[in-house]
Image (spheres, helix red, strand yellow):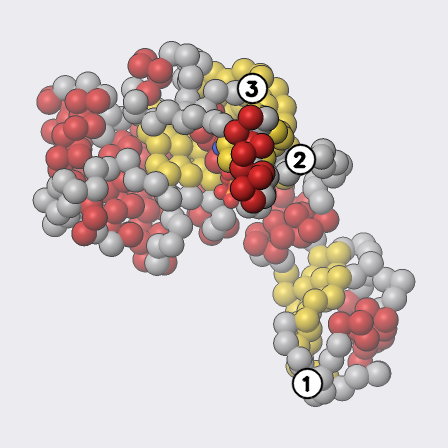
């Protein structure tokens, strides 16, 4: 069964242009000018029940906008969405009972009241019976180590403590699908690891489907068997993490430390005609990325070694972070989309958002 079914999904934002100065402000009052940003451009993907899928992309790629449409917070411009069989923005009441949402940057808990009181309110919002609520809460309290936090107001919690409470809050009604938007942002490595372990076990025990946006590729490594990669509102990769590494991870990254100061242009000049990519870490250190089948390590080194004196050489295989960076830099796994004439700077959106459990 499909947990999430998205077809030709598109989201355009109308944004109001603001003209400069008093004259501009007055003109704006009478004659508003709008421009358009297309955040999500006709994307399609399907996610099966029980899958954990990473949804990644650079800033502004359209990840949050997609999650907001999938959770019914925003209405799509066109295309279709079915989540758990429901159309999120239309069948809200039935729909929200089956989903949990965590926005790392925004709290669903009430700031000034005790955590447990927020949980009680959410129990009412989701109409969870006492019989279901009690065991569920005690399990979440135990698994996420919340017992000391329950009576504290949310504003007094550290970020890591709050995030553990947010996760519990999103799971109180035992949703089949969990949407996580940057759940580990700003957390230290210990809390990140705890949260990853917790999500993995939830997924294994309850077959909870998880769609996760993150900039932390360790989250992806730890949790996701599949990744969907977005660039400028379009999907540029959808497949297994292993295949992504297989396809793109072939090549070598060499770090060279020179005995003298080095310049990027000089290195590029030495390897001119070769398909390699140089970058400079500091005055004495440079790195070169050599894609497989494009050049080989000894060829690149031989061009440099005879000319410059080198103190140290380190050769590494690509990690997931590097692979993703490489894909972004090269445009995409498929064709690079062309930018339409759209801009969003200094402009106010007309869009209204609905709270997930409103
Ligand atoms: N309410 C809005 N009104 C106007 N434009 C918006 C609105 N929300 C998002 N956008 C624009 O849509 C594009 C995609 O934004 P979105 O927040 O979905 O990206 P993202 O991939 O989540 O980025 P990040 O990693 O920075 O959170 C951006 O150009 C953004 O400025």
How far across and how far down the image is residue 312, in percent? Answer: 66, 81
Residue tagged 1: 311
Spatial CA distance of label 3 from label 2 is 16 Å
Going 47% across and 51% down the picture, which residue do you hit?
216
Q: Earlier in the sequence, mark 2 or mark 1?
A: 1
User: Which quadrant is the C terminus positioned in?
Assistant: top left
Residue tagged 2: 342
Residue tagged 3: 77
41 to the left or right of 86: right
Assign a secondary structure to mark 3. loop
Q: Nearer the viewer, residue 331 or 302?
A: 331
Assign a secondary structure to mark 1. strand
Assign a secondary structure to mark 2. loop
Going 70% across and 42% down the picture, which residue do you hit?
332
Can residue 125 be seen here? yes
How far across and how far down the image is residue 325, in percent? Answer: 63, 52
Q: Earlier in the sequence, mark 3 or mark 2?
A: 3
Numbered label tally: 3
Spatial CA distance of label 1 from label 3 is 57 Å
Asked if residue 237 is positioned above or below residue 246 in the image, the reply reads: above
Q: Is mark 1 within 8 Å of ligand 1?
A: no
């Amino acid at each position: 069964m499909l947990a999430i079914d998205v077809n030709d999904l598109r989201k355009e934002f109308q944004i109001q242009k603001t003209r400069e100065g008093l004259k501009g402000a007055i003109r704006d009052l009478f004659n508003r000018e709008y421009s358009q940003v297309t955040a999500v451009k006709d994307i399609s993907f399907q996610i099966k029940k029980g899958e954990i899928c990473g949804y990644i992309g650079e800033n502004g790629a359209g990840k949050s906008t997609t999650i907001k449409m999938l959770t019914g917070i925003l209405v799509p411009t066109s295309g279709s969405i079915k989540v758990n069989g429901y159309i999120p923005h239309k069948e809200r009441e039935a729909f929200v009972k089956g989903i949990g949402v965590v926005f790392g940057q925004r709290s669903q808990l009430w700031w000034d009241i005790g955590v447990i009181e927020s949980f009680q309110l959410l129990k009412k919002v989701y109409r969870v019976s006492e019989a279901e609520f009690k065991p569920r809460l005690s399990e979440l309290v135990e698994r996420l180590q919340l017992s000391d936090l329950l009576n504290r107001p949310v504003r007094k919690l550290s970020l890591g403590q709050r995030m553990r409470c947010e996760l519990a809050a999103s799971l109180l009604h035992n949703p089949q699908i969990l949407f996580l938007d940057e759940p580990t942002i700003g957390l230290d490595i210990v809390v990140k690891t705890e949260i990853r372990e917790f999500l993995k076990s939830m997924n294994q025990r309850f077959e909870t489907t998880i769609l996760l946006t993150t900039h932390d590729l360790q989250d992806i490594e730890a949790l996701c068997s599949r990744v969907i990669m977005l660039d400028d509102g379009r999907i540029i990769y959808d497949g297994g993490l292993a295949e992504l590494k297989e396809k793109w991870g072939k090549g070598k990254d060499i770090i060279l430390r020179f005995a003298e100061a080095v310049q990027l242009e000089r290195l590029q000049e030495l390897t001119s005609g070769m398909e390699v990519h140089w970058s400079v870490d500091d005055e004495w250190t440079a790195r070169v990325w050599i894609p497989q089948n494009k050049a080989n390590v000894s060829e690149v080194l031989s061009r440099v070694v005879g000319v410059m004196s080198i103190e140290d050489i380190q050769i590494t295989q690509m990690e997931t972070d590097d692979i993703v960076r490489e894909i972004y830099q090269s445009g995409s796994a498929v064709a690079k989309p062309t930018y339409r004439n759209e801009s969003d700077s200094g402009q106010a959106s007309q869009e209204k958002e609905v709270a997930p459990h409103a």
